[in-house]
Image (cartoon, grey):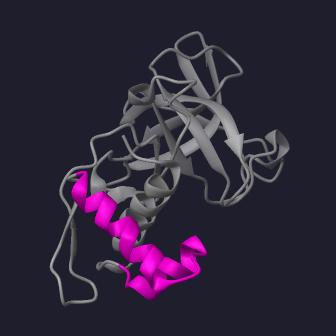
Amino acid sequence: MLTKKQEQMLNFLISFKNRYGYYPTIREICTHLKLSSTASAKKMLDRLEEKGVIRRGHGKARLIEIVNHTHKKGIPVLGKVAAGYPILSEENILTYINLEKFLDTDKYFFLKVTGDSMIEKKIFDEDLVLVELTKELKNGDIGVFRLNGEVTVKTYYYNRNSIILKPENPFYENIIVEETDDFEIIGKVVFIMRNI
């Protein structure tokens, strides 16, 4: 079991590696976690290594390998979309937000929003939406959809065999899903978090 500070460090190591392709130095860890000394960062890394979560190559600044982080990390924040579909794999996860006390984390993920098509529902560019993986939506639900290879967040309506994806911005037109479209409901937006 990791302490809160150890969780923060592990999440920082993961997000830094995902962003830059390599792990942070001790000084970068100190700056991010606001640690007073490099000794504190080294001690925290020692604890993570003792718990079998990381492995370090001693003598080199960035030689850290995460070997086991299957503990409860929280809900992943996805920042990349591969082929228009949010993929829950390590390279697409920016970080984790720990809500495990409240949610079954296997059924949820956060997705970073781009654009302004949902501003009347108070969903703004770079906000995070918490998505529940489900295929069941009711009229008026805000959902995440894959349409012809692209992922979009819109309000869902179904009427007499037609599906309408409604943007919540008067400058955008409704999207009517055609039978020939490659369409999938990914999930339902259940919470909005301002950009972090």
Residue at the (61%, 59%) spot, across then down: 114
Q: Quadrant of the C terminus?
A: bottom right
Magenta span dominant secondary structure: helix
| Residue that lies at the very extreme toward the top in this rendered image | 160
Q: Is residue 157 left or right of residue 168?
A: left
Residue drawn where x is 45% and y is 52% of the image? 7
Q: Which residues are magenta?
A: 24-51
Location of residue 176 by image quarter: top right
Query: What is the quadrant of the N terminus in the image?
Result: top left
- What residue appears at the point 56 percent right and 17 percent down from the top-left corner? 137
Q: Position of residue 91 (x, y in %)?
A: 29, 60
Which sits in the foreground, 8 or 37?
37
Residue 16: give x, y in percent of width and height. Answer: 41, 72
Residue 29, horizontal then vertical, whole percent: 46, 77
Would residue 95 be visible to someone looking at this image?
no
Q: From the viewer's perspective, is residue 77 above or below residue 10?
A: above
Residue 48 x, y percent position in the rendering: 31, 59
Residue 173 located within the stretch drawn in magenta: no
The residue located at (56%, 71%) in the rendering is: 33
Q: Does the segment drawn in magenta span residue 45?
A: yes
| Residue 121 appears in the figure | yes
* Residue closer to the observer: 130 or 5: 5
Q: Is residue 174 above or below residue 160?
A: below
